[in-house]
Amino acid sequence: MPESHYAPVSEAVDGLAERLRFLRETGLGYLTLDREYATLSGGEAQRVRLATQLGMGLVGVCYVLDEPSIGLHPTDNRKLIDTLLGLRDRGNAVVVVEHDAETMLAADELIEIGPGAGAQGGQLVFQGTPEQCMAEKKSRTGPYLSGKSELYKDAATLSPRRGMLTILGAAEHNLRDVNVSFPVGLVTVVCGVSGSGKSTLVNDILGRAAAWKLHGARQLPGKHTGLDGLDAFKSIVRVDQEPIGRSPRSNPATYTKLFDHLRDLFAKCPLAKVRGYNASRFSFNTRGGRCERCQGDGQIKLDMQFLGDVFVECPSCHGARYNRETLEVRYKGINIAEALELTVDEALEFFRAIPKIHERLRTLQAVGLGYVRLGQPANTLSGGEAQRIKLSLELSKRQQGQTLYLLDEPTTGLHWEDIQRLMDLIFQLRDHGNTIVIIEHHADVIKLADWIIEMGPGGGKDGGHLVYAGDVAGLKKCEGSVTGAFIR
């Protein structure tokens, strides 16, 4: 049909082509147009909104982005950075909260807040160009940008010797009937460009199939013809970024069972014994010790009809969650509400003499959550924080070995120093006889892995193939690997 027939709709066609180009520029070329918005990850949803802003062509706007590189392979990251620079060159201000080194190096101005987290943070450590940051002695980021500091592996690199866990005929979504093997007893990183099939392979097939066979889980796994080698495992633990709870009642202390030990401790205090209080008295989920006006929430929810709900501090307990009688019971000068207000670092020192409490706190600190308050509502925690709380719960358990751990981008929202602590713990898990499979884009984490599996070579219909399986040295030599090229 001649092009003249399309003349009446030429503007619409041009507009459509322009919008699609913006989606590709933000690293979303692998998405199908009928993909449900609710199924997008946080990083993908943010980049869709960014593509919308590009289409508006606004000038004089301040754009604020919170870690837009989440879920992006380093090769896709360059497209995103070019997009941000394009917004700047158009006459806008772009403020980005980010941990990605390439994004930092592309910035005109770096602002570093710290020096630590929580109570140890909140100060302006550095402001200036990336080059100045590299030379700044007070900066904790500069040495990693310059290459003076880097992640190191405080454990031996192991090779496959205990057999393989093999997925046969994986064909869910864009996977192309692939067979993929994961070495038992090693730390394996699954990498590849966005949309290459990593999450489908690890979460939808391996995770669900293993949970179904080992624990009788009800979720059906994705299409595959078989799973060999599962007899090497007794259990599977999936550590994802789903919230640890959706209400203010859930918090790090309740999720890690630390709250049970705290309630037992306060029930043993002299005043509690005299009054006949048991451990349930110190729960804000049951009647007796909690404030009944807010029913232990510490806040009152106001229904704003057509607007979002608003939470205000309870006027009776002033956010303490408990009634006056319960708060009169004190251990070493603090009551149960004040104990929940302590950060993990503060509580670690305060409860040093209580082994059961100290051990749980030590694992929370070890995963880089020393700044989090014990009673911090779960709905205020980020996905990365929620994932590390789940990991700390697993670390606090007595290690029996023969457990399969699946982690989905655990470095999200982490600085290099926190990633180092996290990787040290992951290798400790490995050395206890466990197998760890990690979906990850962070180049430094990929370099530390015992075994690497790369899916690709592209995203969407161009992905779903096994590009590489082997150690880091082999990945660097693999000519068809985009990850290998980046690491080289």
Image (cartoon, rainbow, N blue to C red):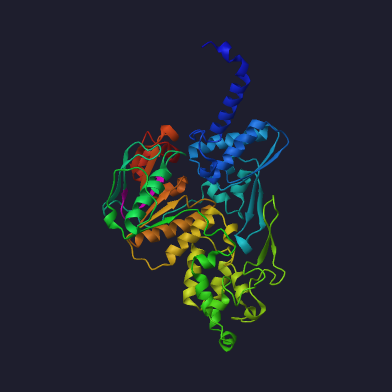
Q: Is residue 417 visible?
A: no
The answer to whether 412 is drawn above or below residue 421 in the figure is above
The quadrant where residue 170 appears: top left
The residue that appears at 47% across and 57% down in the rendered structure is: 422
Question: Residues in magenta?
Answer: 182-190
| Front-lying residue, 487 or 190 | 190
The quadrant where residue 336 appears: bottom right
Image quadrant in which the C terminus is located:
top left
Across and down, in percent, residue 243 comes to 53, 56
Q: Is residue 184 magenta?
A: yes
Q: Is residue 470 visible?
A: yes
Total residue callouts: 0
| Front-lying residue, 394 or 425 | 394
| Front-lying residue, 293 or 407 | 293
Q: Is residue 258 magenta?
A: no
Across and down, in percent, residue 437 comes to 38, 51
Left or right: residue 197 compared with residue 33: left
| Front-lying residue, 12 or 474 | 12
Across and down, in percent, residue 249 comes to 58, 65
